[in-house]
């Protein structure tokens, strides 16, 4: 009897729930997502350090993955230790909001707003890393006199690999 009930229940469920959104492959049990290789993350970080170094600026750089976990952290020889924490928090913020941190400045007014959350830093100097429009991570830079200089160096790091990322991101 239980078998008959289970079959009837399954049939009713299939008939009554045509609007339920299911993944394209209902049999898939795992999600696959692209991940930067360590070599690519290192290339981005080194590109950011080199861009700032060319301007005479010593910086700290952090590349985070899609979860905001650091993949590569570099600190130029004379960059203050504090640049490591700041670059990490900028990168984490950029990947969390999927936006350059410069675009977030002034967006959250109020004493108890989002920027008070631990690990977030709403300050220019980090940009998302994308391939074919898909978010892969972010790079944060700290140590320049302005957030705009940090952001320019972060973007230079991404630009160093963007063409290759876009080729990989094609279906």
Image (spheres, helix red, strand yellow):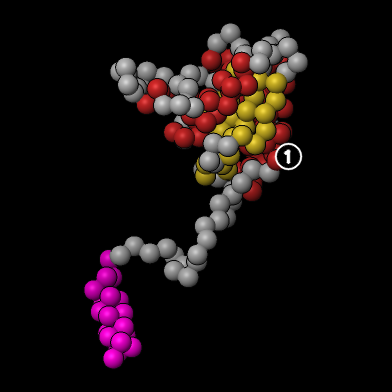
Measured from the top left, where is residue 82 in percent x and y? 61, 15
Tell which residue pokes out farthest to the front in this image: 2
In the image, residue 92 above or below residue 25: above
**Position of residue 7 measured from the top left corner of the image (x, y, whole percent):** 32, 85
Q: What percent of the width, then of the height, locates residue 33?
A: 56, 52
Task: Determine the image quadrant of residue 171.
Answer: bottom right
Instruction: Identify the residue shown where x is 30% and y is 76%.
Output: 14
- Position of residue 134 in the picture relative to residue 15 (left or right): right
Instruction: Indicate yes or no whether the magenta region holds residue 2.
Output: yes
When the figure is inspected, residue 130 is found, relative to residue 59, above or below; the finding is: below
**Region rendered in magenta:** 1-19
In percent of the image, x 66 and y 12: which residue is there?
A: 80
Task: Please provide percent x and percent y for residue 158.
Answer: 63, 31
* Number of marks: 1
Residue positioned 30% across, 18% down in the render: 110
Q: Is 75 part of what is drawn in magenta?
A: no
User: Residue 51, relative to residue 18: is it above or below?
Assistant: above
Dividing the image into 4 quarters, which one contains the N terminus? bottom left
- Say which residue appears at 50% left-offset and 64% top-offset: 29
Q: Residues within 10 Å of mark 1 (few under 14, many from 20)?
A: few
Residue 138, image quadrant: top right
Judge left or right: residue 29 versus residue 111: right
Identify the residue under disc 1.
39
**Element at badge 1?**
helix
The secondary structure that most of the magenta stretch takes on is: helix
Answer above or below: position of 28 versus 111. Answer: below
| Residue 139 in sight | yes
**Is residue 129 in sight in this rendering?**
no
């Amino acid at each position: 009897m239980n078998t008959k009930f289970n079959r009837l229940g399954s049939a009713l469920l299939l008939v009554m729930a045509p609007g339920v959104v299911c993944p394209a492959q209902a049999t898939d049990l795992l999600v696959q997502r692209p991940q930067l290789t360590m070599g690519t993350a290192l290339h981005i970080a080194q590109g950011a350090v080199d861009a700032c170094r060319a301007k005479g600026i010593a910086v700290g750089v952090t590349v985070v993955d899609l979860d905001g976990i650091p993949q590569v952290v570099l600190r130029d020889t004379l960059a203050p230790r504090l640049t490591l924490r700041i670059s990490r928090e900028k990168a984490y913020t950029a990947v969390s909001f999927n936006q350059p941190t410069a675009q977030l400045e002034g967006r959250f007014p109020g004493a108890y707003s989002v920027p008070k959350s631990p690990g977030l830093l709403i300050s220019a100097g980090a940009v998302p890393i994308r391939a074919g429009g898909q978010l892969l991570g972010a790079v944060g830079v700290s140590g320049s006199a302005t957030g705009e200089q940090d952001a320019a160096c972060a973007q230079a790091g991404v630009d160093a690999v963007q063409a290759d990322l876009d080729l990989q991101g094609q279906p």
